[in-house]
Image (cartoon, rainbow, N blue to C red):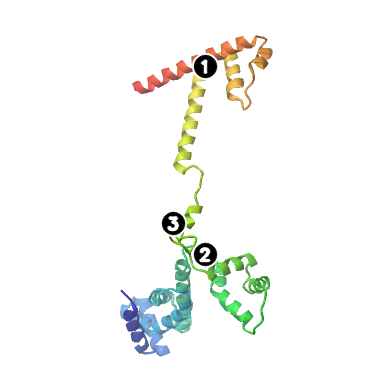
Amino acid sequence: MSNEPARRDMVRTAMSAPYLEREEEHDLAVAWKESQDQEALHKITTAHMRLVISMATKFRNFGLPMSDLIQEGYVGLLEAASRFEPEREVRFSTYATWWVRASMQDYILRNWSIVRGGTSSAQKSLFFNLRRLRAKLTQNGDLLSQPNMYSEISEALGVSEKDVALMDSRLSGPDTSLHAPVSDDESGSATRMDFLVDDRPLQDEMVEDSIDAERRTTWLHDAMHVLNEREMNIIRKRRLSEKGATLESLGIELNISKERVRQIENRALEKMRLELENDSRAILAK
């Protein structure tokens, strides 16, 4: 259901609300600040809804509902009322303008695109002023090259040319669904999602493999305590080193035949296997 009738009623009510004289505005602000007088707050905010609506029209080109912009502006108006200090002798409209604008801008930055943009003051300035500066640079019919235009805007707003180029590309086109077809032919056409397949293992698989590897390392370390020094030396150099030593090289090192090295290795592996089986039975018996 459209909110257009409700928005029209809101605008009509706001435009018919009476203006506040300076003294009356001051008295209402004091009543709200010192006594939390809800009626005083209502009169102040109602009288300044024109300001909210006027500000909302300035941001209508960002494609968001006017009713939402007005609502966010009203939130800023309430924030201004809660912070306003009437003793400073400043008109409420002057003070509230900043809060209303900031509230609308934050809403636009959150909702204009599904991709969040920068939230620094420089990035906000770039987002809201890029189109205006680009139009200003070309208003006299001068055709600036894109690099020169980015350089001018970069200098004016105090951001990098790379940030200007990135923001310009974002503002030039809407968000595109990953499920949209790549070509205009929708019959059996591939979608953008089809080209984002990641062949790497899933996170749960990677964690599972890591846990299994840690367990195997622990079991191996526990099983090796049944080996004597020579058996442990052979197992480490044959099985646990990156480049396993040959039977012949170990035979030369230990001054035994390579057949004897093989026999010791097999005996050591059998001892470790039996130790692991005993540990497994002990765990199951608990």
- The amino acid type, in three-letter code, at marker 2 is Gly
What SS does tag 3 mark? Answer: loop
**Within 10 angstroms of label 1, few (less than 14), some, or many (20 or more) residues?**
some
Q: Which mark lies nearer to you, 2 or 3?
A: 3
As drawn, 251 above or below 222: above
Q: Which mark is residue 121?
A: none
**Within 10 angstroms of label 2, few (less than 14), some, or many (20 or more) residues?**
some
Q: Which residue is mark 1?
A: 269
Residues 27 and 286: in front is: 286
What SS does tag 1 mark? Answer: helix
Q: Which mark lies nearer to you, 1 or 2?
A: 1
Instruction: Name the quadrant of the C terminus.
Output: top left
Sequence-first disc among 1 and 2: 2
- The amino acid type, in three-letter code, at marker 1 is Leu
As drawn, 49 above or below 169: below
Residues 286 and 149: in front is: 149
Q: Which residue is mark 3?
A: 188
What SS does tag 2 mark? Answer: loop
Find residue 51 and report its horizontal and vertical position in percent: 43, 83
Q: Tell me where residue 22 sits by quadrant.
A: bottom left
Q: Which residue is mark 2?
A: 117
Find residue 9 and report its horizontal and vertical position in percent: 32, 83
Q: Which mark lies nearer to you, 1 or 3?
A: 3
As drawn, 259 above or below 180: above
Drawn side of residue 202 relative to residue 6, left or right: right
Per the model, the C-alpha gap separating discs 1 and 3 is: 57 Å
Sequence-first disc among 2 and 3: 2
Q: Residue at 48% x, 24% y: name it.
A: 219
